[in-house]
Image: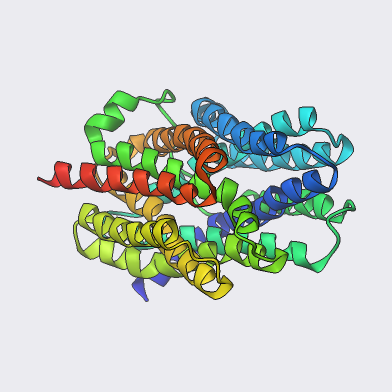
Amino acid sequence: VCMIRGLLPLTALLMGSAFLLFAGGVNGLILPIRGETEGFTATSLGLLGTGWAVGYVAGCLRTPALVARVGHIRAFGAMCAIAAIAVLLSLLLIAPWVWIPVRALSGFCFAGAAMIVESWLNERVDATSRGRVFGVYTMVNLAATTAGQMVLTLGDAGGYVFFVLAAMVYCLALLPTAISATTTPRPLTRVSLDLPKLWRNSPIAVFAVLMVGVSNAAFGTLAAVYGARIGLSLGDIALFASLPILAGAASQIPVGIASDRFDRRKVLIAVTLFALVADALFLFTGVTRPLLVLTLSALFGATVFAMYPLIVAHANDHAEPGDFIQVSGGLLLVFGIGSIIGPTAAGFAMTTFGASTLFAVTGAAHVLLLLFAILRIR
C-alpha cells in the first residue's frame, strides 16, 4: 500500500514512458519485418541495431546539456517529437541508407528519454523503496514494449498503418508530463558525464551494466534469426521475442522487493545464476521443440530483464542527490557500448559456428558479470 501511494505522484511519468515504449515496440519490430519484405540484406538489417546503439551512446552524451538548458519536461517532449519524426521518415524513404541513420536518431531519443525519466524517479524515491519503484518502472516499460510488438499481429506490415500508429503514440507520450502538475526535478548544476567518478561510486554497476548491454542487445537483435534458424514458425518466432519481455515484466516486483531487503549485489548474483542456467540449456541441449524453446526463453527473459533496474538502484544508493542524471546517463552510456559489442559478436559467432552460439555470447557475458560481482563482494 505504501509503495502504491508513493507511485501515485509518478503516474504521469510512468504513463509517458509507457506510451514511448509502446511506440518503440511497434517501431522496432516493423522495421526488420518490412525491411525483409523490401529485400534488404541481412547485413543492412543488422546495421539497424548498430545504428540504434550508436545513437543511444550519442544521446547519453548530449542529453544532460539539453536538460540543463530547457528542463526535464521540455527535453522529454523534444525526444518524443524527434522519435515521431524519425519513424515517419522511415515510411517516406524506404531504403537502408535512410533507415540506418534514422534508427540512430531513434536510439538518441530513447537514451535521452530514459535518462530524464530515471533521474526524475531517483529524485522522488529513497533507498528503502528504490528497488521496487524501478521494478515497477521496468515492468511497465517491458509490458508496453510487448504490447507494441503484438499489435503487429493485427494487420499487414506492408502498408503505412503501423508507421503512422507509432508516430501518433510517440506524440501521445509527451502529453502526460506536459499537462501534469507533478513537481519537476531540481535544475541541473552539472551536465557532463563522469565515468571515472561513476566507477569509484560503484564498480560493480559499471561492469555489470556493460555485460547486460552485451547480453540483452545480442538477444534482442538476433532472437528472431535464432528462431528462424532452428525452424520455428512465424507465430512461434513472435512469441519467442515477446515471452522473454513478458517474463521480465513479471519478475520485476519480486526481484525489486528482494533487492530492497537484501544486498542488491547478492540479489544480482542470484539472478545471474538463473540466467546462466538458461544460457547453458540453450547452448548444450540443442532444443528445437517450440514448447521447450518458449519455456526456456521465458526463464531467460525473467532473469536478464531484471538485471538493469537492480544495477541502477544499486548505483543510485551511493550517489549524491544532484548526481542522479549523471549516474543514469553514465550507466546508459556504458549499456549502449555493450549494445554495440553484443550484436556484433553474436552475429559473427552465429555466422561462423551456428545459431546456438548466440547463447555462448550471452553466457560469456553472464559468467564475467558473476565473477566480477563475487570478487567485489569478497
**Residue 348 shown left or right of residue 202 in the figure:** right
Instruction: Please identify the residue farthest to the left as the structure is shown.
Output: 378
The answer to which of 126 and 278 lies nearer the viewer is 278
Numbered-mark total? 0
For the N terminus, the quadrant is bottom left
Residue 123 on image: x %, y %: 38, 47
Q: Residue at x 9, y 45 (%)?
A: 378
Dividing the picture into quarters, in which one does residue 315 lie?
top left
**Residue 344 shown left or right of residue 367 in the figure:** right
Residue 37 on image: x %, y %: 83, 48
Q: Residue at x 39, y 62 (%)?
A: 281
- How was this image coloured? rainbow
Residue 171 on image: x %, y %: 74, 49
Dividing the picture into quarters, in which one does residue 203 lie?
top left
Q: Is residue 126 visible?
A: yes
Q: Is residue 202 visible?
A: no
The answer to which of 357 and 247 lies nearer the viewer is 357
The answer to which of 182 and 193 lies nearer the viewer is 193
Residue 332 on image: x %, y %: 45, 38
The answer to which of 45 and 136 lies nearer the viewer is 45
**Residue 168 shown left or right of residue 5 in the figure:** right
